[in-house]
Image: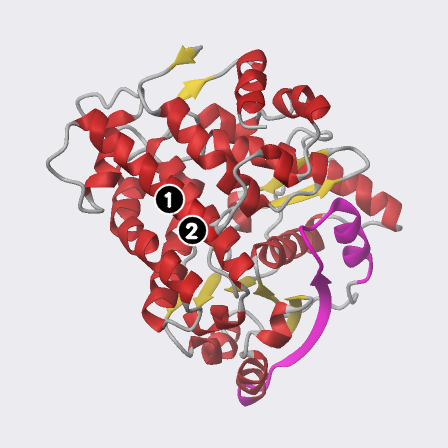
């Protein structure tokens, strides 16, 4: 079992900070999407969540804003679950040929945001003749899947409007796509893919079910914690996490009791965005790395997989990341304890929150078969696992997964 301590050194190491250039946060700000879009074009291509768009309560306000600014708009795609290579190939082939002054606006959860982000990038970077050729071109641009062709042409301007509070996809430079027939989840990634604008309207999450609030909320907490303790952590994202984390830990149980709690809505939507900024500029860890493989293997919700894995990931990293876990516990009011005790208290807080949320505690509850654990362990590599404070071999990871089966 390898470990790696980050050397803070005596000065500042070089860094890159990538965030959306326009961020508007506040209740009712979905009305401003049209105003923002006019900066980039005068025609809107909408990518929407199949159900969330009609239930979030912002549809007519959004359309009224488009009309007030003289914007033409049409739906070009909708997401139904996590986006796949095949869905994107079909959507790209179905895009209108005239792309002059087009702005892509995605309204929905993390899957919808990723769908829109990918569509905006692919619309300017590939010119397929068929769905089959579109699929091959997409594969060639996914990390670790094809020929490694970069996204090097500026995507269509993209505006993200999340209707859930969790994934942070509205702040990141990648879009996660799955491919069931090839058994993978891979990212389409480029700094060019960072949304040009993000509109964070907390009122839009009010229609989310308790199960969606639980899964997305714990995904947000996982991202905040893992980006704070990861091997590639650094000061700016960590400062943002320390500010957002306490409110997120308080907001999630409040929303689970009352999804219309405006204070909690505001806190969690903000924290979700910060989690995206932080993971995009630092990294993640074991919980996210394994959750991706589990999602491919048994179709489990990413948020539920993270909730199942977060407590075990914290325990694995407890010794090497104890100081950081204690810092997170301290901002929750856990002062006066030794560092090991404070780190342990944080883990206990997370376990209790997962219990209250009713998320799974065993991998078997996600639909994973014991015989497939070796496959999951073998395919849990990638950027997230490289960021984990403790580096595990495939065999060590397999044994760990057995312990929570």
Which of the 4 image quadrants contains residue 1? top left
Q: Is residue 87 above or below residue 191?
A: below
Q: Is residue 221 left or right of residue 141?
A: left
Q: Residue at x 56, y 34 (%)?
A: 362
Which mark identifies residue 251?
none
Q: Which mark is residue 352?
A: 1
Query: With 317 as the anchor, is 35 left or right in this view?
Result: right
Q: Give the quarter of the figure containing the C terminus.
A: top right
Q: In the image, which residues are magenta?
A: 68-94
Which residue is located at x 75 percent, y 45 percent? Answer: 85
Q: Is residue 103 above or below residue 231?
A: below
Q: CA distance from mark 1 to mark 2?
A: 6 Å
- Read off the residue under disc 2: 356
Q: What residue lies at 62% left-to-right and 47% top-to-bottom?
A: 301
Q: Identify the residue at image location x=36%, y=62%.
A: 254
Q: Counting other residues with Cα less than 10 Å from the Cα at mark 1, is it few (<14), some (14-19), or many (20 or more)?
A: few
Residue 92 screen position, x and y as percent: 77, 56
| Label 1 element class | helix
Residue 75 among magenta residues: yes
- CA neighbours of label 2 inside 10 A, class few (<14), some (14 to 19), many (20+): few
Please tell me which residue lies in front, 43 or 218: 218
In x, y percent, where is residue 102?
64, 69
- 252 versus 189 height, above or below: below
Q: Which element type, helix, strand or loop, lies under badge 2?
A: helix
Q: Are marks 1 and 2 in contact (CB under 8 Å)?
A: yes
Asked which quadrant contains residue 3, the reply is top left
Residue 174 visible to an observer of this rendering: no
Taking the magenta stretch, the answer to whether it contains residue 90 is yes
Query: In front here: 27 or 121?
Result: 27
Image quadrant where residue 132 sits: top right
Residue 237: give x, y in percent of width and height: 32, 42
Left/right placement of residue 126 relative to residue 176 reads right
């Amino acid at each position: 079992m390898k470990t790696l301590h980050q050397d803070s050194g005596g000065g500042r190491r070089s860094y890159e900070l990538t965030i959306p250039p326009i961020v508007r946060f506040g209740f009712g700000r979905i009305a401003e999407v049209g105003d923002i879009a006019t900066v980039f074009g005068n025609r809107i291509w909408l990518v929407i969540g199949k159900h969330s768009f009609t239930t979030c309560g912002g549809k007519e306000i959004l359309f009224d804003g488009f009309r007030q600014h003289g914007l033409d708009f049409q739906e070009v795609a909708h997401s139904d679950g996590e986006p796949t290579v095949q869905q994107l190939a079909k959507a790209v082939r179905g895009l209108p040929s005239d792309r002059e002054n087009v702005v892509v606006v995605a309204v929905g959860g993390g899957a919808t945001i990723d769908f829109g982000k990918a569509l905006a990038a692919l619309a300017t970077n590939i010119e397929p003749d068929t769905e089959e050729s579109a699929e091959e071109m997409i594969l060639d641009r996914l990390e670790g899947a094809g020929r490694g062709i970069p996204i090097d042409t500026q995507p269509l301007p993209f505006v993200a409007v999340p209707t859930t509070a969790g994934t942070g996809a509205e702040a990141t430079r990648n879009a996660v796509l799955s491919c069931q027939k090839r058994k993978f989840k891979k990212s389409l990634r480029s700094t060019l893919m960072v949304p040009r604008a993000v509109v964070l309207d907390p009122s839009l999450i009010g229609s989310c079910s308790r199960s969606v609030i639980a899964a997305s909320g714990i995904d947000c907490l996982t991202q905040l914690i893992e980006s704070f303790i990861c091997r590639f952590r650094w000061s700016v994202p960590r400062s943002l996490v320390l500010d957002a984390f306490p409110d997120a830990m308080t907001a999630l149980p409040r929303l689970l009791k009352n999804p219309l709690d405006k204070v909690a809505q505001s806190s969690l939507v903000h924290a979700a965005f910060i989690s995206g900024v932080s993971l995009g500029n630092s990294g993640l860890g074991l919980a996210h790395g394994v959750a991706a493989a589990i999602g491919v293997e048994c179709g489990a919700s990413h948020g539920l997989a993270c909730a199942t894995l977060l407590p075990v990931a914290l325990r694995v990293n407890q010794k090497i990341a104890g100081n950081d876990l204690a810092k997170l516990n301290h901002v929750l009011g856990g002062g006066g304890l030794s560092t090991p005790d404070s780190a342990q208290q944080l883990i206990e807080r997370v376990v209790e929150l997962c219990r209250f949320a009713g998320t799974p505690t065993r991998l078997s509850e996600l639909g994973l078969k014991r015989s497939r654990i070796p496959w999951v362990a073998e395919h849990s590599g990638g950027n997230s696992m490289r960021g984990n404070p403790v580096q595990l071999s495939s065999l060590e990871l397999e044994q760990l997964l057995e312990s929570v089966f």
